[in-house]
Amino acid sequence: QLFLKKANQNCKLCVEGWKSLGLKCYYFSTEKLNWIQSRDNCVGKGGHLVIITSQTEQNFVSSQIGETHWIGLNDLETEGKWMWVNNQPLKETDVKFWFSTPEGPNEPDNWQNEDPSGEDCAALGHEIGDINKWFDASCRKQKRFICEK
C-alpha cells in the first residue's frame, strides 16, 4: 500500500505546460493564431481545441485566462448549426455559455461589420469584457487558444 501511494505521488497526469482538471489536460497558448491554425496546433500537440461540457469545466478554463481564447466550436459548415471539433453538434439541451443581456444583442450574432463572411468560430471571452462567456468571432482573427486532451 505504501508503495502504491509513493508511486502515485510521482505520477503526473499532464505533461509540463499543461494543466489538469479531473482526467483531462489543458494547454493555454501564449501565441495568437486564427481558428484553423489553432485547431491544427492542438491536433499537433495530440489533442484538440477545448470542448466545454460542464459548468465545472467552463469555470476552470475561464479562471485560467485573462483574455479571449479560441474554443473548439464553429458553424463553418452550416450557419447557425454549431459543431464541436469532435463533430458533435451543440444541442439545445447541452450546457451553453453564450453571452446575453436582457436588452441584447446576444451571442452568437454572426456580426458582419469586420468580416463580410460573418462570425463562424467561437471564443471564450471578449476583447472588451466578459471573460467567462462565449462569443462568435471571425475565424480569421488572431487569438490565443485552449487545447484539451
Image: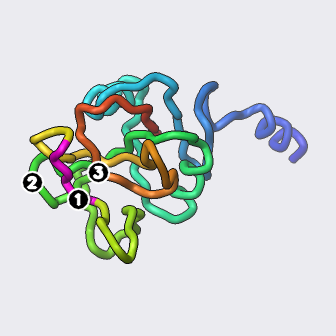
Q: Considering depth in this image, is 69 or 116 the residue closer to the camera?
A: 116
Task: Give yes or no for contact between labels 3 and 1 (Cβ–Cβ under 8 Å).
Answer: yes
Q: Name the residue under label 1.
A: 109
Quadrant hosting residue 100: bottom left
Q: What kind of residue is marked 3?
A: Asp
Q: Residue furthest right?
A: 2
Going 41% across and 25% down the picture, which residue do you hit?
A: 32
> Where in the figure is residue 98, as x and y percent of width and height?
37, 62
Left or right: residue 117 versus residue 26 is left
- For marks 3 and 1, give the CA distance: 7 Å
Quadrant hosting residue 94: bottom left
Q: What element carries label 3?
A: strand
Q: What kind of residue is marked 1?
A: Asp
- For marks 1 and 2, give the CA distance: 14 Å
Main SS type for the magenta part?
loop
Stretch in magenta: 108-113
> Where in the figure is residue 130, as x and y percent of width and height?
49, 55
Height in image: 118 above or below 33?
A: below
Q: Mark 2 points at which residue?
A: 78
> Where in the figure is residue 133, as x and y percent of width and height?
45, 57
